[in-house]
Image (spheres, rainbow, N blue to C red):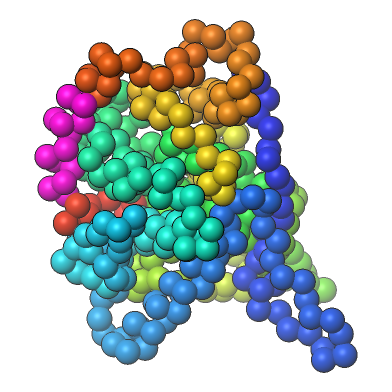
Amino acid sequence: MLTRRTMIQAGAVSLGALAAGCATTEAPPPGPTYPARSLNRDVMEVVAEMRAIGQNLRATNPEARYYRLPDAAFTEPLAYAGQPIAAGNHYPATNCSTACFEAFVRTLNRVEARQGGVYEKLSFDDLAGRRGYPLRSWMMRTKSFDRAIGAASPKFRSMVGPADGFVLYGIGDIIDFPNAAPGDFVQFHRWTQAANGEMQKYNQGHAVIFTGFLDATRNEAGASVITPATRYNAATNCGFTYFSSNGPTNGLADRYAFFYGKKPDDAMSAEPWDRNVQEPTSRDDLYALSIARAYEPALWRREATSLRIDAYISGQSIFALETENRLYADRSYDPRFENTVMAAADMDETTLAERAARDAVLETAFQAEIASITPMYNMEE
């Protein structure tokens, strides 16, 4: 397989750096830097809006439950391309999947209002319904979707999240952890303790938005200190900061995430913090931690989405499909891919009819869940 080219590498900016002040005689600190031609800046502006929503909700009614499983929805009735996305029965309560999906929809609406080109390339049907595997399903993993994709290919049951959806829909890429930047969408899992006392990995998933790295260092007295860092350092990195809807924060808020075994016992509390996140051991370990980045609409590779989805469910590597996205966008076909999904530029009438029949079967179950969204495995204590 071809080596994947990273479109841009940008250091993540920590929450601490964003909040840092300076002396009045000095120039103000530089603002955050974002990957070129990405939607990360817009995502982080939406995060700031949603962070304020969470703070205001808790301040207004501290006794209310603003984090709910499994029946939460969005902080407000959402719409996209002139069509409503159901708010559910417990708005403004959210959970991690619904919060990240709301941030994504808010981002797309923001970009459409500023420059256009979003709705025409990614329709409401593509995003939220009336196709068997809309992008919403890849981001939120509803029960009907999990049943459908699990029946088609048990290998991919409840697996990656936004990262596979962004690649399959041609709107973004999978990003390796050292290259993460504020505004990337993350799906991760934790180590948890089994009944026999043993620690097990790949349990308790969480959907979040990456905001920065965490470093563990020593002060002059030799004590451990956790420091938000602007760039990844393999020797000192112990986790990352993120934004999501979380149980311990009762809704929308920021948290620290520590990799399993990497939070020093004598470190400062760094509350609120998440425990025992499963650290990826290779770039292919997407189930441990996957990072997705969305690019501006001009870079979207929307051709043959249905073919890519079928190829993925049939067992083709998501990294192979990501590479083919680039080749297809460049109209530069490599002979090694001539027999794979992207060799077919368009679907014929028979294929279209087959897709329509398949989508009709899935539609009833999918629409029944829209009013009461139930993420599959993003369980947060």
Q: Position of residue 161 (x, y in %)?
A: 40, 42
Question: With respect to residue 345, does 251 lie above or below?
Answer: below
Q: x%, y% of residue 352?
A: 27, 21
Figure label count: 0
Is 160 placed above or below 92 here? above
Q: Residue at x 30, y 58 (%)?
A: 82
| Residue 319 visible | no
Image quadrant assignment for residue 252 = bottom left
Residue 117 at what x, y percent from top left? 49, 50
Residue pictured at 31% horizontal, 32% vertical: 157
Q: Nearer the viewer, residue 186 or 236?
A: 186
Residue placed at 16% from the left, 66% from the top?
89
| Prevailing secondary structure of the magenta residues | helix
Left or right? Give the position of 269 relative to 219: left
Q: Which residues are magenta?
A: 356-369
Task: State yes or no: residue 96 in magenta.
Answer: no
In this rendering, position of residue 57 left or right of residue 10: left
> Which quadrant holds the C terminus?
bottom left
Which of the two residues, 321 or 303, is positioned nearer the viewer here? Answer: 303
Please name whichever residue, 141 or 287, is drawn nearer the observer in this view of the structure: 141
